[in-house]
Image: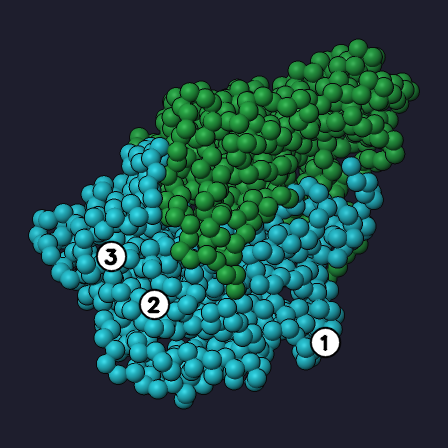
Chain colours: A cyan, B green
Amino acid sequence: MLMVAWPPPSDTKHFWRIIVSNANQTTVIQYVLARLKEEGVGDIFGVPGDYVYPVLDGILADPDIEWRGNCNELNAGYAADGYSRIRGLGVFACTYGSELGAHLALAGSYGESTTTLMLTGFPSTQQQASGQVFHHMLGNHDYDLFNKMAEPLSAAHAIITAENCVTEFERVLAAMKYHKRPGVLAFQFDDVHKPLASTEIPADIPLRNPVSDPEALAEAVDHIVDELSSAKTVGAVAGIAVQRKKLRVETEALLNATGIPYATPFQDKTALYETHDGFMGTWCGKFGNLPVEEYLLSCDKVLAFGYELHYFNAGFFTTGLDFANRMIDIRDHSVRIGETVYDHVEMKDVLQALTTRLPKWDGLNAPSKLTPFTEAGGSGDDPISTGFPFYKRLEQFLKPDDILVIDPSSPVLAGSFVNMPEGVDYISQALAASIGFGTPAALGAAVAAPERRVVMLGGEGAHQLTAQEIGQFYKFGVKPVFIIINNDGYLVERYTCKDPESSFNDLPKWQYHKLPEVFGCEDWYCARVETTGDMDAALDKVNSGEQAAYLELICDRYDMPPMSEAMFNLTRPKFGQTITWDEWKSEFDKGHNIATL
Amino acid sequence: MLMVAWPPPSDTKHFWRIIVSNANQTTVIQYVLARLKEEGVGDIFGVPGDYVYPVLDGILADPDIEWRGNCNELNAGYAADGYSRIRGLGVFACTYGSELGAHLALAGSYGESTTTLMLTGFPSTQQQASGQVFHHMLGNHDYDLFNKMAEPLSAAHAIITAENCVTEFERVLAAMKYHKRPGVLAFQFDDVHKPLASTEIPADIPLRNPVSDPEALAEAVDHIVDELSSAKTVGAVAGIAVQRKKLRVETEALLNATGIPYATPFQDKTALYETHDGFMGTWCGKFGNLPVEEYLLSCDKVLAFGYELHYFNAGFFTTGLDFANRMIDIRDHSVRIGETVYDHVEMKDVLQALTTRLPKWDGLNAPSKLTPFTEAGGSGDDPISTGFPFYKRLEQFLKPDDILVIDPSSPVLAGSFVNMPEGVDYISQALAASIGFGTPAALGAAVAAPERRVVMLGGEGAHQLTAQEIGQFYKFGVKPVFIIINNDGYLVERYTCKDPESSFNDLPKWQYHKLPEVFGCEDWYCARVETTGDMDAALDKVNSGEQAAYLELICDRYDMPPMSEAMFNLTRPKFGQTITWDEWKSEFDKGHNIATL
């Protein structure tokens, strides 16, 4: 047992009292908020708590930042993630200790390369000096434990004081932007409203203004030009870094100048908008849009912009692409060609150089804007099918500039193949794949762009994790469209586990379409929809108006999109049985006989 | 960029296929479940996911363990915590990566000294060997990152394989029980259904069977007896270790034999049942039940059983007790007297030895079974007051053997002073103090003891964090009583922040009493209650039947229990102003003039 002083130092008990010594100088929180506004932040999500009061007081005192309270910390983190997808940076605040509730959201942001910033409270200097144990602690005396725990989930983290504020804030923000990762700032309680010790940004903040090494850049570009000089067939893959790094213009300029067709991997949908002439479709190995896979396999070289190689982005490892020898890997700050890596080479510089250096390819026989969803089909009393009929309707339902959020649940597998109108941003979470991300992320996106329509599509099992956030849409005056697929259980689990009828796939039977009313949303159009005809009428009604909507689509227990069905056939384990890779491919081909998928 | 083999090893893609090589031998999961049953576990909470399928399949295959699915990982962790409060061990399962969603629950268990065990999935040996990035990962290759992150939140954690299962399971469980802390077991996917490499429990599992060092025990007991020999006035403090270590019988025997009166600190309520003759009341320094504080200050010596010194347990640091010189600190595995510490001394042995060695004190002028709630008051159309009127009614409402769960929200401050009938267990979360703990914890407690009535009391702001778990009560066939105080905002925040009307204290306006219906609960008695008369009628109706119930009590925006009001007067900061400890005490006395509080 640690011996502590008793009684504690005289000021320990009123740690929440703050001395503002000079109101005319910029304070810690004023500086941070001013910088966040420069980065495009106009809203901060979160959950209040006493350690973080000074931060919240600062937010409320700023007329140009809106406080957007959430039901819990996880939802706040997801909302900030959704906001960051649209604005480039999303921020949420929560109190000391309770910040652990948002760690799953930080992990999601990390995997999705989004810059989500968590602001938390931190014990005062008096509290720390007392050696006492306060609430929200674990009972030990590691005041900085929670901040340290954020280490693997963030590009950088810091405990902010009046002395270090400028340097540490800029260090964390620069690292977040450089790595496209979350950051964490814990604000020492008594320093939040103190004037800054210095307002000058040091010249040597690491990663703050990355520039290409001219020699490495020249060598890398030469090498790429050389590699492509003999390539008859060329393709490109646009990874999410293009959107995250705000390089859509530069990337499109390169593609326009060279005529190189491109695909977007599963996780990276809408990295470039899908109405571009060169867009082939979503690439997911042999799992879907097979002509895209075939075209890329036929290429002598494939240019990749920020492509991440993992389970989903490799079509569940079904792609046959020879990454090592065919892919020219242009990353945020480096280029890899075969075993040669050029560091200190910025993607923007490479894109711009290649635009002037590369020739134009003509007559490349690439597919264009592939969609597997050929016919809507069904009508009247037909049961709702979330195969082709629903997804074709979704393609027709979407309007330019919509934001489509798909909860990582059964619709994500088919939804990533839906062709998008101009300007549609697609938001999901392929890698971290945490069910429940969708609802709060949609909230964040809606707040980020209140002039755009947000459509949130998801399965009801995933929805249950975070559904209580629905009330916030109404509270914040945004009007989403929810489409919830209710098939009475965790459908992805049903088609991937040993026994689909395992009781762990069963859910409490909610009346989903009544959720908005109970959560306080007035004047929403809410409906429980059971037939194709009613679905058509409901989608028409939503699309012809401006009303917020919540459609609960009742589907058969095993109704699923064709891609999900393929995955089901391929991957549902037969307990105690093992198959080889060749058998797997053969089984895949059997179960997956729609050539365009 | 890490270079990885491509294509991946042939078995990487079907990591979920398992070979059971010998069905006649005990498998990993069979061993773990058998051991958990020996520890009193009959239910496992959680959320399914593919990495954890083999674990879940094992659970479903065991006829003596029920799967209890939750809406999300945080709720699952809280439910397991609630279960552990009643059964001594609570278990939940969730999938790899998503386990981060439960870290806040682990932190709560850590602070509350509960043994909550998280079972998670872990990539297969094939996946690990492939070096590939799979879903639920961060995009890097640290397969064991999440397991390592649980380090500070657990007594021990392990990755379980067929080779290490027995040793590692026993090591983790022993550490959990020794330290009264959570544990984490991640199950390597392909090993879950393999036969154990060995079924023998090694003799040298650390911490497994702690025994007192005879010499240290004798010295410690002699020292205590010597200290108390000249003590004219003695008191005791029963910490939660008494309940967690199942030492109620031994502690009561000591108190009966010696006549020493005892109090329970704020966090430790019902460590001993409150109908015991020697029970003085809840001790919370000068914050409440002042005669308890006065009696303890008057004692020459105070025996403490597992007392933890922190913010709440020291009455927000208002107690004047001279811990260093007056308290004899009997802890789980040690005794501290002044600056002397005796290690390797088990609390049970000390209790039993003292019972035979100490004299009986007569004529100690201690208070008995203090309650600040003297009069119920109010009737008819009177607005509902959550001051004395409500809490006196709560005392009258509770029945023997009820389980009272109070969400860490405004009612926790007054609720901890409510006098409990025989056998009532009180569950809250004072130290970690995470709002939203209550609803899932109540679920866990109800599942742990379906024959007992669970009353869950909380504020509506806290309720919003985890309210979706209500549907599980109906699904699992348990019948709780919810009492939700709706005062239109975060009340604790209103009375502790700078400006009570700060917009961060506002909430979406839910129709709380309709939640059970929407979450699928049939035949519940649900009511929105606005007057004292209606509250009396509703409480009577609940108490005269067996129906599950959900009462939404509509209270004035600033209606609060007297203890909360005192805290409000004392601690609400006046921005830019600071006061001394003496001023604080003076202000306390002014604002806090109810002598019995």
Q: Circle 1 marks a residue in which chain? A: A
Label 1 neighbourhood size at 10 Å, few (<14), some (14-19), many (20+)?
some
**Residue placed furthest toward the bottom:** A356
Residue in the picture at 41% in, 28% down? B21
Image location of residue B492, percent across then percent down: 57, 48
Question: What residue is disc 3 on?
Answer: A525
Q: How far apart are marks 2 and 1 (CA)?
A: 45 Å
Amino acid type, mark 1: Ser
- Between marks 3 and 1 in the image, the one whose residue lies nearer the viewer: 1
Question: Could you tell me which chain the residue with mark 3 belongs to?
Answer: A
Measuring 25% from the left and 48% from the top, which residue is drawn there? Answer: A586
Residue type beneath disc 3:
Tyr
| Marks 2 and 1, the one that precedes in the sequence | 1
Q: Where is residue B478 in the image (x, y as percent from the top left)?
A: 40, 27
Does residue A438 appear in this view?
no
Q: Marks 2 and 1: which is nearer the front?
A: 2
Instruction: Give the residue pinned by disc 2.
Output: A264
Q: Could you classify mark 2 by the number of other residues whose Cα lies within 10 Å: few (under 14), some (14-19), or many (20 or more)?
A: many
Relative to A272, say whether A3 is above or below: above
Nearer to me, A256 or A201: A256
- Chain letter, disc 2 residue: A
Residue A340 image point, x, y percent: 52, 71
Q: Do labels 2 and 1 share a chain?
A: yes
Dot 2 falls on a residue whose secondary structure is strand
Q: Is residue B165 visible?
A: yes
Identify the residue at horizontal 70%, vertical 51% (top origin): A143
Residue B154: quarter of image: top right
Q: Mark 1 points at which residue?
A: A198
